[in-house]
Amino acid sequence: MAVLGIDIGGSGIKGNLVDPFSGNLESDRHKIATPQPATPSAVADVVAEMVSHFDYRGPVGCTFPAIVRRGVTLSAANVDESWIGANAEELFEQHSSGNDFTVLNDADAAGIAELEFGAAKGRKGVVIMVTFGTGIGSGLFIDGVLVPNTELGHLELDGHAPVEDWAAAKVKKDEGLTWEEWSERAGAYLRHLDRLFSPDLFVFGGGVSRRWDRIQPGLGVEVETVPAQFENEAGIVGAAMAATRR
Ligand code: BGC
C-alpha cells in the first residue's frame, strides 16, 4: 500500500507516494508553489490539488513548519499568522473529502523517517534531528519515541533570539557567509543543544546536508553527528509513516 506524503514549506508544497513500510518513494515527486499569502484556505486548496494529482484515496500525512498539536497549528514563525489556532487536519479533510489527514511538524516528520529507515536507523537513547533551512527545526527522540514540537530553533544563544535567525541555512545565503563561517554557527548551536540535552546522536538535516563535506570540518561538535540520509524527502516519508501509525 502506498500512502501520500505531503511536505508544506514556505516556497513549495511537495507530494509523493511512499511505501510506509520501507520508506521507498513510489512515484515521481510533484511540486506546487506555495500560494502567497499562504493562508489556511489557499494552502488547503493546493493540498486538495495534490491529492487529485495522484488520484489518491486513503490516509494522507502532511508536514507543517510550526507547532502542531492534535491537528491544530499553534505557531506561525515562517508562515501566515492566520494559521495560529487553525485545525489543519479538519481543514484539509474538508477540502479533499474522502481522505483522512495526519498533520505534524516538519522536523518531527523528518526525524521519524531518519530513525526508522535513515541515518539514525535503530538508534536508542536520546537522538536529536535538526533541520537547517529557512528556519531551524528539531525532532527529539528518546529510545525511538518522539517528543513532538520541541521547536529548538527558537532557543536563545548568546543574545541571538531566536537562534534560527542567526544559524539557519537561509542566513548563510542572506549574509553571504562561507561554509566555514556558517558551519561554525551551526556547530555553536549544536554544542548548545549538547549542553541542554546530552544527546547520543545528532542527525544533521535540511537541503544543506548534501554539502556535508563542506560542513563537517567546521562544526567542532563532540557528540556523534551524521548527515541525514533522506535529504529533502525526509518530511514526505515521515509524514506518510505517521499517517499509518496513528
Ligand atoms: C518553525 C518550526 C519548523 C522549523 C523548520 C521554525 O521556524 O518554528 O516549527 O520545524 O522552522 O521548518
Image (cartoon, rainbow, N blue to C red):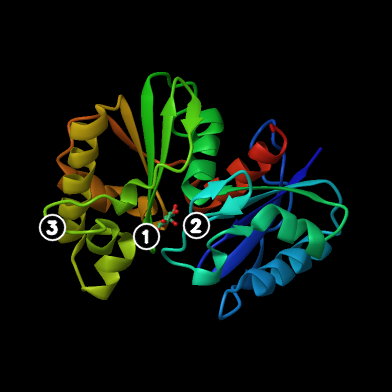
- Asked if marks 2 and 3 touch (Cβ < 8 Å), the reply is no
Instruction: State the residue position of label 2.
Output: 65
Mark 1: C-beta under 8 Å from nearest atom of ligand 1: yes
Q: In the drawing, what numbered circle is on residue 159? A: 3
Looking at the rendering, the quadrant in which ligand 1 lies is bottom left
Amino acid type at image mark 2: Pro
Q: Where is residue 146 in the image (x, y as percent from the top left)?
A: 49, 31
The mark that comes first in sequence, 2 or 3, is 2
In three-dimensional space, the C-alpha distance between marks 1 and 3, rounded to whole angstroms, equals: 17 Å
Q: Position of residue 225 (x, y in %)?
A: 29, 35
Q: In the drawing, what numbered circle is on residue 135? A: 1
Mark 2: C-beta under 8 Å from nearest atom of ligand 1: yes
Comparing 7 with 163, the one in front is: 163
- Asked if marks 2 and 1 touch (Cβ < 8 Å), the reply is yes
Quadrant housing the C terminus:
top right
**SS class of the residue under badge 3?**
loop
Comparing 30 with 217, the one in front is: 30
Q: In this view, does 171 lie to the left or right of 145?
A: left
**SS class of the residue under badge 1?**
loop
In this rendering, the answer to whether 200 lies above or below 81 is above
In this rendering, the answer to whether 121 lies above or below 36 is above
The mark that comes first in sequence, 2 or 1, is 2
The residue under the point 31% across, 53% down is 154
Instruction: Examine the rendering and report whether any part of residue 11 can be seen.
Output: no
